[in-house]
Amino acid sequence: MSTEQFKNLFSPLQVGPMQVPNRICETTNTINSSMIPGEVDENFIAHHGAKARGGTGWIGSETWLLNLPFPPETPDEVGLAVGFAAHFAAYQNPPYVEGMKKFYQEVHDAGSIAIAQLTHLSAVWAPSSVPVISAQDYTPHVMGEEEIEFCINSYADAAEVAKSIGADGIQIHCAHETLCYSFLSPVTNRRSDRWGGGPEERIRFVAESLKRVRERIGDSLALGIRISGKEFRQGGADHLQMREMTHHLGETGLIDFVDIDVGHCWGAPSYVPSSYYDEAEFREVGKAARTDLDSKIAVLFSGRVNDPGIAEGLLKDGYCDLVGMVRAGIADAEFANKAREGRLMEIRRCISCTRCIDEASEPMTFPYAPTCSINPEIGHELQWKEQFKPAETPKRVVVVGGGIAGCEAARVAAMRGHQVTLIEQGNRLGGQLLIGKLARGRESFEDQIYFEENEMTRTGVEVKLETSADVDSIKALSPEAVVIATGSLPRVPFDIPGIDLPHVVQGWDVMQGKASTGDRVAIISQEDYYETPCVAEFLTDRGKQVEIFHKSVHLGFEIARYSIAMVLKRMEECGVKVHPNLVLNEVQADGFELLSSFGEKTYREEGFDSVVLVYGSVPQHDLYDQLKADGSIPQLYVAGSAWLPRFMAEATQHGASIGLAI
Ligand SMILES: Cc1cc2nc3c(=O)[nH]c(=O)nc-3n(C[C@H](O)[C@H](O)[C@H](O)COP(=O)(O)O)c2cc1C
């Protein structure tokens, strides 16, 4: 049945000399899966290899950053300071090349094809002295002829190495903040020599690079580009100009595929669109490219396709020939096989929360590892291979709390053969996800609840809803292992005078309809991720006028550059005013006093009907403490927020690790 349902998705495609076994593509995602910087180690191979074994036909793995034309006397420290490859690039480093060769073999053994994405990503060299939107906004060094020649040749040099170690295709990265992009864009390319001008002149750098690569690799490898369908940047190329340039590049006869997306890294949208955007919202750019290009050139579209059904629809309706599904594979490396085998209920769908890209671009954990809010395996593939084994002695396990940590502990323990009972006091599993899904643009969070609900049934976990647990009721079940995953509750800053006044309420309570507010609302924010913006938007959607008084330099300080613009743009659209660098000092009936986060200056605010607190949460581990004192449970664990409230990924990983350990 699923073969028929996904007829297009699982049909092979000839792309130049390369036969892609199906239409599912892991477009390149530099997720830092190697533990050895600048090399391809066993973690890298395990991470991206899992997607190939999981049925993804096209594997783009991580980008190849190329060598840059530093003046010879520039010390390496300068190269490192600009953040990218210095005098030498990874492809010139034998251990990297050796590791990549092993990886390509792994991909081929799984029946998939491997692409090498070649990238010049630098804020330092550019066609003109206009800063590229990037991690660093230097006024760039304007490239002379020799430097242009150097960069063009570096694509060919790297392509030759990629060919020698078994890559099936080469992609020159011309989207995002790359050097090719800055030659294509009218904002960053203001040259009046042969490298600048109208669309036909601005493509010259890309066309010349493609030509050199083709000369070096011949016809035995597929060659293509990744290009933006629309910049979403003031003064940037609109979709018509991008179409024109893509068309001209197609006309060169040098390319076999075009991989198209939209946005830039600081943009709204960025090219890693969050759940604030619809699935495949920018699909029209794919259709336009298909219309404009010779039918022999395959078009790959990417951008929030998280479901095989949506991917099939895109193919069927002519939006593209290949579908980028990066985060779908981060959330579930096996999703393609599951779809082909009709195991749709078992797919863990990406909820587009953006933790993966937040972590990859501005890591919050050390050592750096790929991170996903809902998939505990990624970044730990080798550990899972070692530890995910049937339990030697199946045990009776009781899990208390049906949030993500409890569900993951129960799911993994049950899959390993334990007999698991999960007790939840509410009427549904999900914990804090039940609150998160109430936020506009976060409806996708419910997908993870459905996943856990299905998994409980599939793995045979006995779920007892609307049931409270205490020491006696747990002991009555005679468990050999107990996991306390009782979550956390909103923090009340008790040391602040006036905090118990009736017009002071909690953000969680507002979202859940347990507290109401007047028309003019002050949110006092002590958290730096998505919670405050979600509460603010929830209130403005209900007609409230909202101002946020926030502890740090800007709202969502821990949301990385690929995602923050979407959050701030929505605040702008909702008319929410944000006052940074302030903490609450005192609340009175007719106002409140704030203190500067950095100094001693105080400010008084008046005229608000309600004060809403978003202050993080406090772990609830009383039951764990009581069971520990009792001492009769052989294996006792505390999981997730009940131990320490952090992000969703940490709760997922904590719960799953306990499931592995029991
Ligand atoms: C962690 C991460 C790293 C990425 N790194 C790159 C990269 O190095 N080169 C690139 O062209 N795109 C990169 N991307 C963008 C993806 O290729 C893809 O276009 C994007 O994730 C949207 O597709 P999706 O909705 O299927 O995830 C990255 C995405 C993620 C999530």
Image: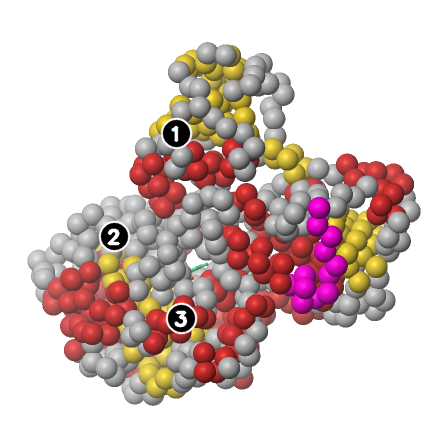
The circle on residue 323 is none
Residue carrying label 2 = 232
What's the CA distance linking mark 2 and mark 3? 24 Å
The residue positioned 48% from the left and 65% from the top of the image is 328
Residue type highlighted by circle 2: Phe
**Where is residue 378 drawn, in percent x and y?**
58, 62
What's the CA distance linking mark 3 and mark 1? 39 Å
Residue carrying label 1 = 544
* Viewer-nearest of discs 2 and 1: 1
Q: Which residues are magenta?
A: 455-466
**Where is residue 493 drawn, in percent x and y?**
60, 24
Residue carrying label 3 = 311
Between disc 2 and disc 1, whose residue precedes?
Answer: 2
The residue positioned 40% from the left and 85% from the top of the image is 12
Q: Is residue 453 left or right of residue 278?
A: right
Q: Is residue 225 visible?
A: no
Q: Is residue 301 visible?
A: yes
* Viewer-nearest of discs 2 and 3: 3
- Specify the quarter for ligand 1: bottom left
The residue positioned 35% from the left and 86% from the top of the image is 14
Q: How is the image coloured?
A: secondary structure
Q: Would you call the spot at circle 2 few (<14 residues within 10 Å), some (14-19), or many (20 or more)?
A: some
